Image (spheres, grey):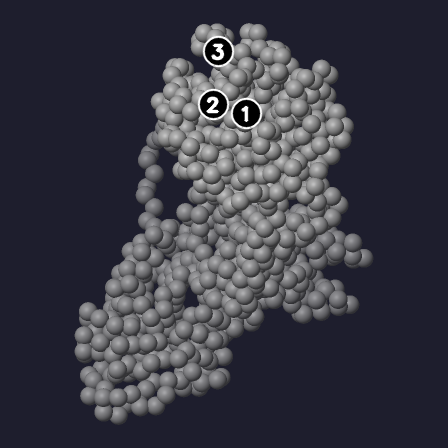
Amino acid sequence: MGRRRALLVATYEYEDAGLRQLNTPAQDAEALADVLEDPAIAGFEVQMLINEPTSRVGEAIDEFYATAERDDLTLLYFSGHGLKDDNGRLYLAMKNTRRERLRFSALPAHMIDEAVAESSARQKILILDCCYGGAYAVQQLAKADSAVHTKTELGGRGRIVLTATDSTQYAFEGSQIHGEAAQSVFTRHVVEGLRSGAADLDADGDITADELYRYVYDAVVAEQPSQRPKQFADVEGRTVIAANVGWTLPERITANLGSQLQPLREAGLQELGQLLQASNEHVRETAKAKLEELTNDDSRTISTTAQAYLDAPPPQTRPQPVASPQVRRRAAAGPTFGGAPRATVRRWRDRVRLPTVDWAVFLLTVAAAGLAVAAAVLDATWYSVAVASVLVVAVVAQLRLREAGAAFVAGLSVPGLVSALLLTSWLTHLIPVGLQRLPGYLDAAAHGTWLAAGVVSFIKWRPGRPRPELRLVLLGAAAAILILVMVVDAYRGGPHLFKPDLLDRLSPVVLGILGAELALACPLLNLGRPFLAGWVVGGFVVWIGLVHPAAGFSSLLLVLFAVWLLLGIVGVIRPAAANLPTGRWFMAATLLAPAVLGGVAVAVVPPAARAPIAIGLAVSPDSQFLYAADIGNERIIKLSTTTRKQIGDALRVGVQPSRLDLSPDGKTLYVANSGSGTISVIDVAAWKVVGQPIAVAPEPTELTLSVAAHRLYVLSKKSQTITEVNTETMQTVGGPLASGANPADIAVDDKGKRLYIAGGDSDTVAVIDTLTRQPARSPIPVESKLRDLTPGADGALYALGSSSYAVINTNVETTRPTPQPLPDGSRIAASDGKRLYILGTEGANDVVRIVDLSKHQVVESLTDDLGATVELAVSQDGQRMYVSNFFQDGILVLDTVGPKVIDKIELKS
């Protein structure tokens, strides 16, 4: 099936002062574009050129006809001045046209004729609403007659030319135009005839070019007797321009069918049967419904005839263009090889009617739907089922929307990109081992194919002309402001991007932002209902993927989903007779639904418990208890190292607890809340949070405790400062202490007199006097970029670098440690006084190394995938190591002999 393409050219502003500035062309083109691009009326792909120079218009017309294919219907419309030169040749005036240089500044009609003649399209319509002769002075008018002879200039085989008039209509005085331009009643009646369906003179549901001309001629002459439109046609068959959207069963047929006279009833039935052959689907469906009703008529003749009409083979949905007659070649005398197969192919091609769709987009969507359905069958989740359902809907929608299906898939593709980003973050959970690999791979392939279909549809899709709409812009701006308020509120609440809770709270906002931006752009791009329907339906999938992992499903949330999805479905189906809201406010509602409903979801849906992620670890002095900071749920968990089960309830602390420091007597636990910039204090014996959180510098990440000095030092890597806290008064002391650039860790000596700061980008350890807050000595060199400071026995401080470690004696002022080499990749260390336990990486694996401090040698090691280790804690008896990680649930338990993983402590949500 060919495309329906229209190029509208309107010029009303001219650089030549002698050419009258017109008022109506812009409005004419706007009104005609509205009706032509309406899929319910004409369904044209419309391109507009307003006040463009001759070169731009010429190139556009040349490309318009050069790219047309055989079965395309092309329509070229021009509104403006039409001029003639001294030889009577017709020119169309553009913005830069000069009266004395028509040949090179105006668009010659014969060039348009050549472009039309050379086009492959078999159906070509030209509509000219021109003010002919409108630029000529009196002396020029004498050189040519008043007729423009449009047929001679633009007539030709396979085309239809409609003109507003074929003669001049202006009076002149000197070199200036005298009088006002007559109102363009021609285009107004063209638009009215198409929009209202009044041009459907034979009431068959189709408006042909001939019907449109006859309707416009009568209407124009009745209003302006001096203006007589013209038509020049040289085509075979009918050229259907539009459908009659207001078509109803003609009264004469209804009256005849209701008559008591059998001949009249049979005549009405015959006309009704003929309507089954109409190309307008609405006409056929109406006729079919009436015939089905008549199959139960009391008259056997009427019921039998009605059934016979229904049993007749259905017609083609749209009449095909009639090709120009060609001379047939005489067939060869004898049989020809290949003739029979070709005839068979032709017969099957005529019998099998393929749907009118963009096949590249359609096949990609079918592939994506198939992969998604397979993934959903193997691993049914809310998200996988939603993806499969929506992609199946996309396949069905393309069959229904036909040529507009690409716009629907284009609308799906933007949410599809967000959905693909979601999937990439889940792949590690979808494809861990075994059979689960297959649905994960299928999901990935489905999303990739989905995006490919979107890319192809975007390349082929041609949005309509610009149409600013202030109300939509204001609504989009309001949605954007609403989104901004929600983002600011979430940020002020404390979470940061690292924290999963922020993603959960802002996840509906992600799609809302896209919806608001599209609401701003849509009035300027005129994306159309199919695109909006795809946008809304695709957004439904993204909502499933975003909200379900965060909060689960409630009845209220499902209602919100249903409302949103209904908007998308209405945009796809939209029966013409259903009186459903399909205006610009409906378009605004579909666009703003993600933002508004996203805001409602954020407000009414409480966040559900997330999978626990243990980051900070601490072991009690007697090795009986393990304390873990659950960063995902803002709590501290107490675990038994014997039963490896949780003891009591978890304690709620600040946002994003990431580091723990337990007092040597095991009675007080300090928690660094990186998300809220506070320190929480826990009474371990009573197992409760003591007092209010202590405010420190933003994002505290490291702690070091001095029992002797009653001080807790808190390092904030973000602000590069250290906060001093009095552990007796639970208050900060003095102002922030500068840590230097890019600090890695801090430690304090046993007496609380010296504070050690490891520089992450340097190979030195700074030493600060805690009383004066000034450097106590020059930095201590360790010959490796530092990663961690680990206190040991008898005043030893182990400075761990990426490829070595050094032992700093904090009991002397002039310590000069000797670096001990290590393999590259060391990150974290812990000590039981006899051995140093080091976590590092080697390629894609995690490495645990055990160093005998008496020999300064690595005596044992373990290389394995431990799930991106974060923290290491060692029991005081030196028998167990505990490792927290990002990508595996729970806490790994390692035997220090080996070492080897012996168990995993599961954490309850």
- Which residue lies at the image location 48% right of the left edge and 30% below the top edge? 754
- Hey, what amino acid is under mark 3? Leu
**On the image, numbered disc 3 is attached to which residue?**
853
Q: Callout 3: 10 Å neighbours few (<14), some, many (20+)?
A: some
Which element carries disc 1, helix, strand or loop? loop
- Which residue lies at the image location 44% right of the left edge and 77% below the top edge? 186
View extreme (bottom): residue = 173
View extreme (right): residue = 298
- Hey, what amino acid is under mark 2? Thr
Total marks shown come to 3
Which element carries disc 2, helix, strand or loop? loop
- Which residue lies at the image location 47% right of the left edge and 65% below the top edge? 467
Q: Which of these two is toward me, 532 or 690?
A: 690
Q: Which of these two is toward me, 512 or 289?
A: 512
Q: Callout 1: 10 Å neighbours few (<14), some, many (20+)?
A: some
**Do the residues bearing badges 2 and 3 touch, measured as CB atoms within 8 Å?**
no
Q: Say whether disc 1 or disc 3 marks the residue closer to the N-terminus.
A: 1
Q: Is residue 105 left or right of residue 213?
A: left
Q: Nearer the viewer, mark 1 or mark 3?
A: 1
**On the image, numbered disc 1 is attached to which residue?**
750
**Do the residues bearing badges 1 and 2 touch, measured as CB atoms within 8 Å?**
yes
Residue 155 in sight here: yes
How far apart marks 2 and 3 lie (CA) works out to: 17 Å
**On the image, numbered disc 2 is attached to which residue?**
810
Q: Is residue 323 left or right of residue 889?
A: left
How far apart marks 1 and 2 lie (CA) works out to: 8 Å
Q: Quadrant of the C terminus?
A: top right
